[in-house]
Structure formats: C-alpha cells, structure tokens
Amino acid sequence: MERKQDIKEEILEKELSTRKIILKLAWPVIIEQSLATITQIVDMMMVGRLGAAQVTAIGLTIQPLLFAHALAAALSVGTTALVARFTGRGEESKCGRVLQQSLLFSLLVGSVGGTFFYFFASNVMSIMGAEPQVVTLGTSYFRYLVPGFIFMMLGFMVTAALRGAGDTRTPMKVNILVNILNVIGNYLLIFGHFGAPELGLDGAGLSTSISRGVGGIILLYFAFSGRGVLMLVGKKFFMPDFELIRRILKIGLPATLEQLVMRTAQIFYVRVVSGLGTVAFAAHQIAINAESISYMPGFGIAVAATTLVGQNLGAGRPGEAEKSSYEAWKIGSVIMGFMALVFLIFPETLIKLYTSNPEIIQLGARNLRIIAFSQLPMGTQFIFAGSLRGAGDTRPVFYSTAVSSWIGRFGMAYLFIQVWHWGLAGAWVAMVIDWIMRGSFVLFRFRQGKWKQIEV
C-alpha cells in the first residue's frame, strides 16, 4: 500500500515538474504575444480613427504579406526542431550552424519578397479586390512596410533558434522593445505629434518598419556576440551547408506548403468577405484583431510543447515527450476555455475599443460570439501541431491544414455567403468549422504515436 502511494506521489511530482517547465517556457512567449496583440489593438485603434477605408487597406494588405511571413515561419519550424534535437543530445555547437544556414536562406527569401512587394504593390491590392481608394492607400502603406521586412525575417530565425534551445526570455525582451517603439512611432507619425510629419496610414507602415529594423539588428547582435545559448561565427558565414539546409527544409518545407496553401485559401476567403462591403469587412477585420488575444496563450503553450518534444526526443525520451504534450494541452484547454467565456460575455466591450460605429460594433460582437465555440479546438490544434512540429512530423499537419482551410473555411464560407446568404456570420461559422477539423486531425495523428520514430 505504501509503495502504491509512493508511486502516486512520484507521478504527481513529475507532472508538477513538467507543468513548471511548460509554464517557464511559455510565459515569456505569452507575454511577448500579449504585448504584440496589444500593440496591434492600439495600431488598429489609431488607424480606425482615420476611417473604414484605412482599416480595410490594412486588412487587405496583411493577407498577401502573410505569404512571405509564412515562408519565414515555416523555415523557423525546421530551425526550432533541429536546434531542440541538438540541444537534447548535448550537441550545442551544431545549433549555431543551424541558425547560420536559416539566416542565409531567410535573407534570400526576404530580399526577393521585399523587392516583389515594393514594385507590384498596386497590382497585389487590385487582385485582392480592393476599391480604388483602398488600392491607393494600401499601395503606399505596402511600400512603407518593405524596408523592415527583411529584418523581421532575420529576427524570426534568431527567435526560432533561441526557443529551440529553451531560451524564450530573450526574444520576449527584444519584442517588448519592438512593440513599444511601434506604438510610439505610430503616435508620432500617424497624427504628426511633437513636430513629426503627419503621414496617416503611411506613418503606421513607416513606424512598423523602423521598429522591426531595430528588433532584427538587436537579435542579430545578440546571436553574433556569443552572450546567449547560441553563437554565430562570422568566419565563413556566407558559405552554405547544403546538407544542413536539406535537413532544415525536410522539416520546414511541409510547413511552408502548409502556410502557403492556408494563406491562398484565406485570400479567397477574404475576397468572399470583402464582397459584403466596406463596413462589413471593417467589422470582420476589427473582430479578427480582437480575437487575436486568444492566440497568445495557445501559441505560448505550443512553443513550449515544440521545444520539450524536440529536446526529449533528442535525449531519447519519447515517453516524456508524449507526457509533456498532454500536460501542455491540459493547461492550454483551461486558458482557451476562459477566452471562450470572454468572447461570449463581453464582445461589445472589445469591439468598442476600436470603433464607435454602431453597425460595426453589432457585427463585430456577433463575430466574437460565434468564434467563442472554436477556442478549445483552436487550442488543441495549436498545441498538438506544435508537438508534431517539434518531432519533425510536419507533413500530416500540412495535409490537415490544406483540407480544412479550403473545404472548412473557404468552401463553407462561399456556401454560407453566396448560396445561403448568411452574410458575415456565415464567414465566421466557417472559421469555427475549420478549427474543429484541424484540431481533430492533429489530435488523432498525435495519438497514433508515429512521430516518435521520425529522424530529422
């Protein structure tokens, strides 16, 4: 009897220890994402005072930019997974080489993407179905964003490598500074305070570029200085290691395809929604921005799951990798359940932070009440997809996202809006269906356990 009690206490102690590690890794990411979300809210509040056309311009600009963001984020998946594996094996010297190759690749992608967006900004806005006024506003805003684009991508890589090594605090500190600079820059450049030029929407784009540039430079300096868990070597920095790039892309390429397919589906989805008119789309974009507060806890816990799975597999402990994922899911479910209640009970309060337009408030609040039903499936998708990515099992995540984003989100939105005429509510019901499909599949894949045998 005493032996059984000892075993129970030992199991409980391990669970508590795992939860502490998860929270230790997750809280800096949650704070970082929280401040980023607050910054987005403040940005949208400031831009919202300029008018619905400006809000719509930002909303339509974001969609094609997410293509480039997707490439960086996907490449960062391979970086995080490999760094976590090498850290778990005690091969820290290889972590710097992984980061170096990721930086080279992202520098190439960022340069090509930035050049394209600068010269073809108006074409992209027209393809998005924007009205003439919105095309003009969005084109100029687009071009102000480009200078900070490359630094943002390089910062992504350093952040990904640090997280894989278990350092989530350094990216948090840098991104806190970036967000503070962005808010200050917006205040000065959008409205022309303290002698700064009054640039309106262009001021928001310029402020974003400046803050991202500062953040990227700081992270690169940190990586080259050797003060943290990773160290880059300047000698032969520009020499590619094709075998290492292959290993990064083996994990990252399915994640890249996942993001590209999802973003393409979202562009078609946004075009369907934009057809409902400027006011409806402004309500859609504001509600999306308000809903993003629920991403931060789920994303933070997912980063912890990715790191722990990768490090435990690297150390030859697949059982611990599985247990840490389920513990992360339990924590995430509690937090996301709370966010669902917030969206159900206080949606008008959130939407009123952005606008005083009664019609937009009514539509936006209804959107948040609908999306409340996706919070638990969303948390499930975040965390178990993060676990699978940490193991390098990225193909199934790609397949699930491809099917759910095209059938669940775009397909159902088209049906609800164009055929059944549900209006904006139909678009948000389709989002709920999308998250349920994705969350269910990644949970099923994780429970199969095939990720434990994957070599990266």
Image (cartoon, grey):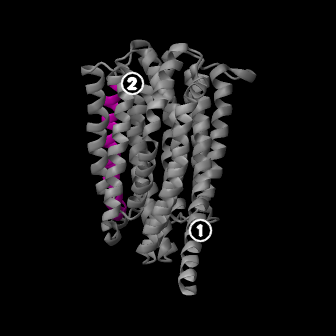
Mark 1 lies on residue? 16
Please tell me which residue lies in front, 113 or 135.
135
Q: Quadrant of the C terminus?
A: bottom left
Please tell me which residue lies in front, 101 or 52.
52
**Magenta residues (range):** 245-271
Residue occupying image coordinates x 67% and y 26%: 187
Q: Position of residue 441 (x, y in %)?
A: 31, 52
Q: Is residue 57 above or below residue 241?
A: above
Mark 1 belongs to which amino acid? Answer: Leu
Q: Give neighbour class at mark 2: few <14, some 14-19, many 20+ (Cα, 10 Å).
A: many
Is there any visible trace of residue 388 in the rendered image?
Answer: yes
Q: Position of residue 104 (x, y in %)?
A: 43, 55
Q: Secondary structure at mark 2?
A: helix
Majority secondary structure of the magenta segment? helix
Query: What is the quadrant of residue 410 in the picture?
Result: top left
Q: Secondary structure at mark 1?
A: helix
| Residue at the extreme right of the image, as rendered | 194
Q: Give neighbour class at mark 1: few <14, some 14-19, many 20+ (Cα, 10 Å).
A: few
Residue occupying image coordinates x 64% and y 25%: 189
Mark 2 belongs to which amino acid? Answer: Ala
Whether the magenta-drawn stretch holds residue 270 is answered as yes
Mark 2 lies on residue? 425
Whether the magenta-drawn stretch holds residue 414 is answered as no
Residue occupying image coordinates x 27% and y 21%: 420
Q: CA distance from mark 1 to mark 2?
A: 42 Å
